[in-house]
Amino acid sequence: MSTAVVAITLAVVIVPLAYLASVSLMGRDEVTSGVLVPATPAWSNWSDVVTGTELLRGVGNSLFAAAVGAALTLAFALPAAWAIVRYRTGGATLGGTLMSPWLLPPIVAVVPLFTLLRILELNNTLIGLTLVYALVNLPVAIWLLEGFLRRLPSELDEAARMDGAGPVRLLLSIIAPVVSPALVSIGIIVAILNYNEFLLATFLTQSDDAQTLPVVLSMFYGERTPHYGKIAAASLVGIVPVFAAAVLFQRRLVGGLAAGSVK
């Protein structure tokens, strides 16, 4: 039974990627004719999207916004979640209250964020978009961190205070290392959310210097008859960093999520 489940899961994951790779080597006519495998691989699709477009810059911008935004989110989320858990800041419902706006459609926040960035003179900049990502995903990071921090025994705090540790040292030197698997797991989740985000990036960045991967990919559909082979090739290039991160941080991600599931 387990073997069948694994086989079905692999098929669901691999088959679409395999077909995407096949489409990336097709010409314009082959894609529309519905063939599964190109008769003659069109390797020029790959060279065209890599050298003739802003794809690589978009990937770099997405990686920067994802990584830096996730780091800033964790830097704010850890003390916030710690204050909620240990000092009962805001009462028992503050975490849920912070989480509720995150569940709303992102479009409702576009105009306020656009206005705020314009006031700060950060509109249409990668730095501004990164700060928006850091703030937008802060509620979900706090909500996830609460579950990990509530499992830490209060005796840990008492022992640190007896040794003369203040609140800042306690948080940075004791609590942060203990929950580091959780921080890595949440950081990866937030980074992936940032990397895949499209709506805010579309409205808050217009120049080529600031556009992220999802925005660059959307530009391929601007033609009257889009070249789906090039779109597939560009999509595969954008997938590579996500797969690389999944392979590199697989153990930390699984370990952090498993630690949070055990009381």
Image (tube, grey):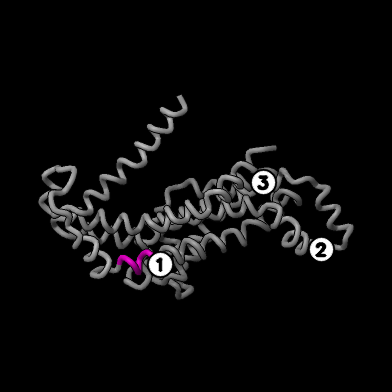
Residue range in magenta is 55-59
In the rendered image, residue 24, in percent from the top left (x then y), is placed at: 23, 53
- Give me the C-alpha separation between circle 2 and circle 3: 21 Å
Residue shown at 63%/51% (left/top)? 181
Please name the residue that numbered disc 3 is placed on.
Answer: 148
Main secondary structure of the magenta stretch:
helix
Residue shown at 14%/57% (left/top)? 224
Please name the residue that numbered disc 1 is placed on.
Answer: 61
* Element type at mark 2: loop
- Give me the C-alpha separation between circle 3 and circle 1: 31 Å
Q: Amino acid at mark 2?
A: Gly
Q: Amino acid at mark 3?
A: Phe
Q: Earlier in the sequence, mark 3 or mark 1?
A: 1
* Element type at mark 3: helix
In the rendered image, residue 245, in percent from the top left (x then y), is placed at: 47, 55
Please name the residue that numbered disc 2 is placed on.
Answer: 166
Which quadrant of the figure has residue 195?
bottom left
Residue ranking furthest to the top: 1
**Total labels drawn:** 3
Left or right side of 234 for 78: right
Residue shown at 75%/50% (left/top)? 86
Q: Earlier in the sequence, mark 2 or mark 3?
A: 3
Q: Nearer the viewer, residue 139 or 146?
A: 146
Q: Amino acid at mark 1?
A: Asn
- Give me the C-alpha separation between circle 1 and circle 2: 39 Å
Left or right side of 205 for 187: right
